[in-house]
Image (tube, rainbow, N blue to C red):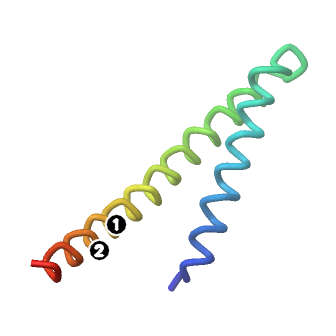
Amino acid sequence: MKTKSNRKAGFESKYERLEEILDLLENEAEKIPLEDMLKFYQEGLTLVKECRSLLTEVEIKIEKISEEEKNQNN
């Protein structure tokens, strides 16, 4: 089971890697072979999906906590 800090580190490392890939594709595309660009693009898509999944998980937890807090105050 992943701990909260592992999820946070996982998100942050995934996001940092995504930024690296984006920087490569935006600023060094002319130096990167097409096959490598495709690999970077595919890796980026995978990272986007994983980050969105982690964010959705956090959003659901926040909504649950907010609802519990609202119910306790009523």
Please provide percent x and percent y for residue 23. 77, 30
CB within 8 Å, label 1 to label 2: yes
The circle drawn on residue 62 is 1
- Along the line of sight, the residue nearer the viewer: 67 or 52: 67
Label 2: element kind: helix
**How many numbered marks does the figure carry?**
2
Where 14 falls versus 2 (above or below)? above
Where 24 falls versus 14 (above or below)? above
Q: Is residue 28 left or right of residue 74?
A: right
- Along the line of sight, the residue nearer the viewer: 59 or 15: 59
Where 17 falls versus 28 (above or below)? below
- Along the line of sight, the residue nearer the viewer: 7 or 21: 7
Please provide percent x and percent y for residue 14. 65, 54
The circle drawn on residue 3 is none
Q: Is residue 47 left or right of residue 16?
A: left
Residue 9, image quadrant: bottom right
Amino acid type, residue under disc 1 in the picture:
Ile
**Quarter placement of the C terminus:** bottom left
- Give the residue furthest to the top: 30
**According to the image, label 2 marks what residue?**
65
Q: Is residue 16 left or right of residue 10?
A: right
Label 1: element kind: helix
Q: Residues within 10 Å of mark 2 (few under 14, many from 20)?
A: few
Residue 67, image quadrant: bottom left
The residue under the point 65% across, 49% down is 15
Amino acid type, residue under disc 2 in the picture:
Ile
Residue 3, image quadrant: bottom right
Please provide percent x and percent y for residue 58. 41, 64
- Along the line of sight, the residue nearer the viewer: 13 or 34: 13
Distance from Cα at disc 1 to Cα at disc 2: 5 Å
Q: Is residue 27 left or right of residue 13?
A: right
Q: Residues within 10 Å of mark 1 (few under 14, many from 20)?
A: few
